Amino acid sequence: DGGAQFAILHQHFHASSASTRALLLSTYAKLANLYPNCQKLVLPIFQKYGSSSDLEIQQRSCEYLTLNYIDMEIMEEVLKEMPNFPENTESGPETRLRERLETAKKGALASFRSLSKKSSKEFYEVTEPPKVVQNLLDIGFTSESAIESN
């Protein structure tokens, strides 16, 4: 029975965080769609929170309230259950993340191979830093001209 489910959920509504209350409002709309006897229970809640200071709660309340007064077929279509996602299928973000990780591994492996080909003398060879110094105005000058100006 939808009324019992609603009562159990709604007893925690006021003690919940704003994000949880927003989810509960969505749950109430789905309950009203599944159990017609719940409509008379949830409509006053949507009306009350339609002027909430929390914009997410206000928006959901107004949308679900409006949805209730529109054609029932539209409401059923909007609130119908989502199809199950196949367990053996990767989602788009999972696929992109896996591909990025594989690319990063290949790049790291290539860098390691190029470093390992250098002799230890080449690897530890100290090179002289460039003789260009930049001031705060980003005007380049050579170290020799800086020394001469002092």
Image (cartoon, grey):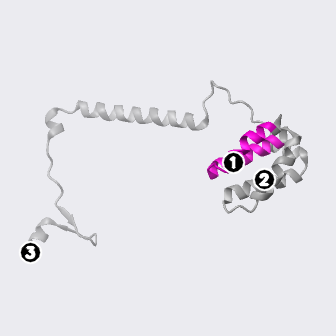
Residue, disc 2: 45
- List the single residue furthest toward the bottom: 149
Q: Is residue 56 magenta?
A: no
Within 10 Å of disc 3 (Cα), the crowding (few <14, some 14-19, many 20+) is few
Q: Position of residue 79 (x, y in %)?
A: 79, 42
Q: Quadrant of residue 90?
A: top right
> Could you tell me which residue is drawn at 66 percent across and 59 percent down?
54
Above/below status of 127 relative to 123: below
Q: Amino acid at mark 3?
A: Asn
Of the image marks 3 and 2, the number of the one nearer the N terminus = 2
Task: Compare residues 65 and 18 and report the one nearer the observer.
Answer: 18
> Could you tell me which residue is drawn at 18 percent across and 37 percent down?
123
Q: What secondary structure is the stretch in magenta mostly built from?
A: helix
Q: Is residue 120 left or right of residue 107?
A: left
Of the image marks 3 and 1, the number of the one nearer the N terminus = 1
Residue, disc 1: 13
Q: Position of residue 7 (x, y in %)?
A: 77, 41
Secondary structure at badge 1 equals loop
The answer to whether marks 2 and 1 mark residues whose Cβ atoms lie closer than 8 Å is yes
Above/below status of 49 relative to 105: below
Q: Amino acid at mark 2?
A: Ile
Q: Which residues are magenta?
A: 4-32
Q: Is residue 150 left or right of residue 93?
A: left
